[in-house]
Image (tube, rainbow, N blue to C red):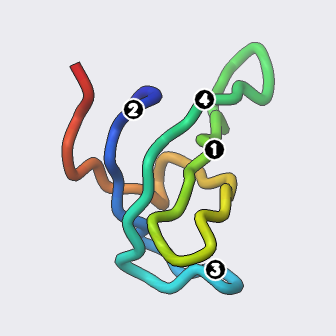
Amino acid sequence: MKAGDLVKITRAGIGVPINTIGLILQTLATGPDQLYDYYQVQLCNSENRVVPRLKRDLEVINESR
């Protein structure tokens, strides 16, 4: 996964229902082992919020080139 990929949220969160569509804005590493990289995802809803999500919580719908 990388910036520009269209993704679907597979795990619900507070104010973010399951199957919400979003766009990855950037990847943020959490340490040298990078086991828990997380992604800043802009939600495609009326609020256009940006939320952090782990890779396990996302499913790629369409990859950017």
Asked if labels 2 and 1 touch by Cβ distance under 8 angstroms, the answer is no
Q: Of the residues tagged 3 and 2, which is closer to the observer?
A: 2
Q: Residue 20 has which mark?
A: none
Helix, strand or loop at disc 2? loop
Q: Which residue is mark 1?
A: 40
Q: Is residue 3 left or right of residue 39?
A: left
What amino acid is found at the position of numbered circle 4 in the picture?
A: Thr
Q: Earlier in the sequence, mark 1 or mark 3?
A: 3
Q: CA distance from mark 1 to mark 2?
A: 11 Å
Asked if labels 1 and 4 touch by Cβ distance under 8 angstroms, the answer is yes
Q: CA distance from mark 1 to mark 3?
A: 14 Å
Helix, strand or loop at disc 1? strand
Q: CA distance from mark 4 to mark 1?
A: 6 Å
Q: Position of residue 47 (x, y in %)?
A: 62, 73
What amino acid is found at the position of numbered circle 2 in the picture?
A: Gly
Q: Quadrant of the C terminus?
A: top left
Res 8 quadrant in image: bottom left
Q: Which residue is mark 3?
A: 13
Q: Earlier in the sequence, mark 1 or mark 2?
A: 2
